[in-house]
Amino acid sequence: MTTEQGLVARHAEELRRAVEDASRGLVQRESLVELVVLCAVAREHLLVIGPPGTAKSEAVRRIARRLGGGYFEYLVGRFTEPTEIFGPINLQKLKQGVVEAETRGMLPEADIAFLDEVFLGSTAILNTLLAILNERRFRRGHTDLECPLRVCVGAANSLPEETQLAAFADRFLVRQFVEPVGDTSLEALLEAGWSLGGAAPKPAPKSALQALDALSAAALQVDMAPVRGDIAHAVRLLRRAGIEWTDRRIVRSQRLVAASAVLAGRNAVSRADLWPLVFALPTAEAQASGREVLAELLSESDNASLLSAALESSLGARARGTRMLHDGRALLAARDTAADAGAWQLAVENLARDIDASFGSQNLEPELAALRDEVVKLLGERPADAGVTGPPDGSS
Amino acid sequence: MAPPDPASGLQGPASFSPRESRPRPVPLEPLALVAHGEVAARLVQHLLTWPEQSQRGERCLADLRAARAADSLFVIAEPQSLPWVDGVQYLGRDTDAPELLLSTHVAPALPLSWLRAALARMASRLELSAAPPLAVCLEPPRVVSLGAARKLCREDLLHWQAGRSAEAVP
């Protein structure tokens, strides 16, 4: 491993830990946390579409806190003034005929920003925001400021239909569509909400944001040639299936692919990094169809730092295996500390079912085979599996 | 209550062998399972520890539907309700052949349209029920209609277990 590769791997590990810390206590929002990091490394922006009360802001707040740097969050309304987001005009300087904004603590000086109901912003707000998103520059009167913004996360209940707003929305390359937590995870949601309460991840070590910047720089140096043909093939497959996306999105999606590679600790791209293409598709329907159309191409998808997003995007066996290894090891390690032994046993049984349903019991990768062996041994200790000769306990 | 009738199964002739298979790039969601022989016996033993009805949302027999064919036991359920014992094979629904339940992790090498057509012809020729879903097992090769699968209860499991014990007596 070269020194450069070693550095990329070390920074990726730093961000993997940040993602893990920020995701702790969140239910079914892990991939949202991961996509914030992916976008930040790719220097792209994320749009989250979903109903209110689905922990969108909480997920973003957690990873922002864990990464460190300046964080700006605002709930935009129809009557929001530009000064509420970009900073008030300096009245002292205005008396001298200079129009300058006081940007301290406001979006132009933020490293990570979250704008809820972003499409409700006025034309003045959206135009100013457009320049910040595209050029990372804030211009107002005599103020001309380079913005440190790594990623802006916009949120809304639905995608806008008006042409002008749709053009603005196109600047958010990555889209995630969230739903309320499903029936099967309600217990986990209640438990996490009760036991963690408002617990936030520990404050960021300085190295997290530095690692993010280092990976951003490394991503720009990645040679995309090894996957260029694959990306073009993906676009053709999507077009053939009637899924259209703008040339801008197609070109910029390469940044996501490169970011995926460095976040996996590599400075060379491979087919394992193609999974973010699905998140660059503009609508929920396009993403759902895209997953199916690209299933074969994305089957090698994998990312140890962004387990959930890689899995959600590709649904592929490899990403699934990596996720199972991670979750399975954590589950087995919690055997002695599990508050409810019955629930723990059930989770182990579910893990066994998921491994066998995804891969069968033969021809597993060595690490997964070892995990399965351990799970089988544990479940073999179940009273029911001790033998098949005795009569069943209890009456009908 | 008598156990599900094994005759409701559409069991393919020996010449039907879709054994050639390839790993699926995207595994199917498990919606059913099949257990053969000793694995089925262990599955029955395990299911006998489950409650008949759910009290507080835990898994229970009433969440499962089952059918049997020869020494195989087929169970249909929501993914989170499916049990596990070592050796069961999980089946799921491929969008290209929604009436079939196929292995979740390997796909038949032959096109699904051919498989569907072959199964339909076979069912017609043998005048057997092909009520969907049709469970297609690769190993051992077996096709069984689960259209008549019904809610599983403790009595069925005990009946199955007793039947197996009787068969084992020389």
Image (cartoon, rainbow, N blue to C red):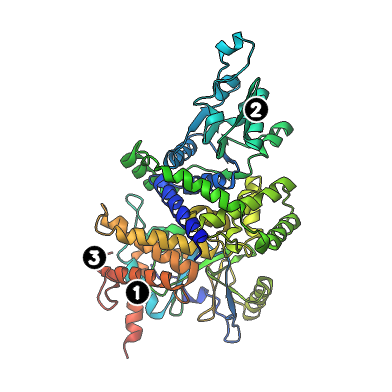
Q: Is residue B19 above or below residue A40?
A: below
Residue B142 in the image, given as x and y percentages of width and height: 53, 79
Pinpoint the chain carrying mark 3: A
Whether callout 1 and callout 3 share a subunit is answered: no
Pinpoint the chain carrying mark 2: A
Neighbor class of circle 3 (other Cα within 10 Å; few <14, some 14-19, many 20+) is few
User: In the rendering, which numbered label is found on residue B42?
Assistant: 1
User: Tag 3 or tag 2, which sits nearer the N-term?
Assistant: 2
Q: Amino acid at mark 2?
A: Thr
The foreground one among B126 and A79 is A79
**SS type, badge 2:** helix
Q: How far is mark 1 from mark 3, CA to CA?
A: 17 Å
Residue at the spot x=66%, y=62% of the render? Answer: A227
Closer to the eye: label 2 or 1:
2
Q: Quarter of the image holding residue B152?
A: bottom left
Q: Is residue A151 above or below residue B73?
A: above
Q: Is residue B106 above or below residue A262?
A: below
Closer to the eye: label 2 or 3:
2
Q: Amino acid at mark 3?
A: Gly
Q: How far is mark 2 from mark 3, CA to CA?
A: 72 Å
Q: Quarter of the image holding residue B81?
A: bottom left
Q: Quadrant of the C terminus of chain B?
A: bottom left
Whether callout 2 and callout 3 share a subunit is answered: yes
Query: Mark 3 and mark 1 in contact (Cβ < 8 Å)?
Result: no
